[in-house]
Amino acid sequence: MALIKSINIKNYRGFDSLEIDDFGHVNILIGNNNSGKSTILESIFLTIGMSNPSLPDNVNRFRGLNIKSADEFKFLFHKLKINNNPEFKIVFQDESSRHLKLNPIFKKASSGSKQPTKTEDIIMDASTASPNMTGLELEFSLKKPQTQKKNYKSSIIFNFPEIIQNQNKEYKEEAHAVFLTGNSSEVNALARYSEIVKKKKGDIVLNALQKIDSNIESIHPLPDGLYFGYKDIDELIPSNISGDGVRKFLSIVTTIAEKPNSFILIDEIENGLHYSAHKSIWESIITISKEFNTQLFVTSHNLETLTCLKEILELQKYKDNQEDLRVYTVTHTKKAGVKTYKYTYNGFKNAIENQTELRR
């Protein structure tokens, strides 16, 4: 799997234009609340899954927005202006690239008119005073080295009470991204862990969990959920009554281990984790992501979490991972809009040790 090298984002949410280059294997995005860290993760998620017409709806749901009409897709558009078409381009380390553009679909209002069900039935026209948005067209392309760029389209159309997805049947997605929000739970951990067990990799998850709770002796995927075997307890304990930290840890570790050769996006990694588990989570995800060849993009706003990352990478067994780290601060500037400032491991380490604020 070729790793992502750079991303260019235009007209998406709070960004008019942003480019980030030189991603590593493990990428940490830091910054104040509302600086745009989650927006960057969403941009990667949308572009990796660019053929999936449900993703624009999904990223709004990540933020608690329950889309009830196509007009609410305006929250994806910079300054809520529907002529600011969101646009994304990712370039990979092998110089392949993918491009995605979100186009609003309009239908001129007319009494008794029926909502369209196919993109071809839509009037792409915003000339009316108050055009009615009926959906989104996803215009996307893929360019591989020494091949011609291929262009495709898909769409999501609101035809209440139905939401119709027109997926492009000529395109087969080869890339895979998983987005873990700050409020993600272990609800899908059973399915993920079952797949991991089939690959005879279950011990990796168990060893990771034992770093934060040494009393866990075993993990059991049963029809009604995951159960833990604890020392000195005669019955198995459902994972969903374990502590928040164990459940968050389980969600992250199983996600990375279940999807080799993929892109893992973790928003607010410290949410639900006690400080004592921060070193363990970094140790586990660095080890597992390397073994399963996943590229990590993680957001954080917690200095203690970042200090734990530095301390883990100082250990002899993880020193080879130092060159894989990139830390980006995301900040709003008065003149240049949103900017990012990159730190490799040495710059990040020096800032933490000298108690120098990472530039924001």
Image (tube, helix red, strand yellow):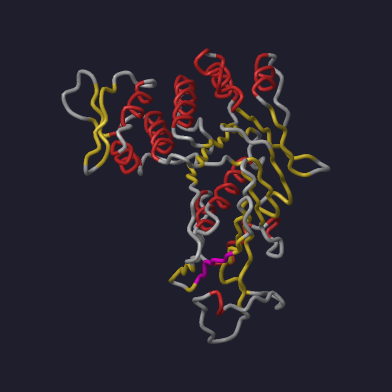
With 126 as the anchor, is 105 left or right in this view? Answer: left
Looking at the image, which is closer to me, 179 or 186?
A: 179
**Residue at the location (47% across, 23% down)?**
283
Task: Report which quarter residue 130 is drawn in.
Answer: bottom right
- Residue 84 image offset from top left, x and y in percent: 71, 61
Magenta span contains residue 48: no
**Residue at the location (73% across, 49% down)?**
17
**Quadrant of the rendering where the C terminus is positioned:** top right
Residue, far right: 335
**Residue at the location (53% across, 13% down)?**
315
Looking at the image, which is closer to me, 181 or 282?
A: 282
Task: Report which quarter residue 343 is drawn in.
Answer: top right
Looking at the image, which is closer to me, 236 or 102?
A: 102
Magenta span contains residue 157: yes
Label total for image: 0
**Residue at the location (62% across, 56% down)?**
147
State the predominant SS element of the stretch in magenta. Answer: strand
Residue, far bottom: 112
Looking at the image, which is closer to me, 239 or 149?
A: 149
Q: What segment carries the magenta color?
A: 152-158
- Residue 94 image offset from top left, x and y in percent: 61, 43
Residue, far left: 234
Q: Considering only vertical position in the picture, is 35 above or below 327?
A: below
- Residue 345 image offset from top left, x and y in percent: 64, 22
With 235 as the anchor, is 217 left or right in this view? Answer: right
- Residue 301 image offset from top left, x and y in percent: 60, 31
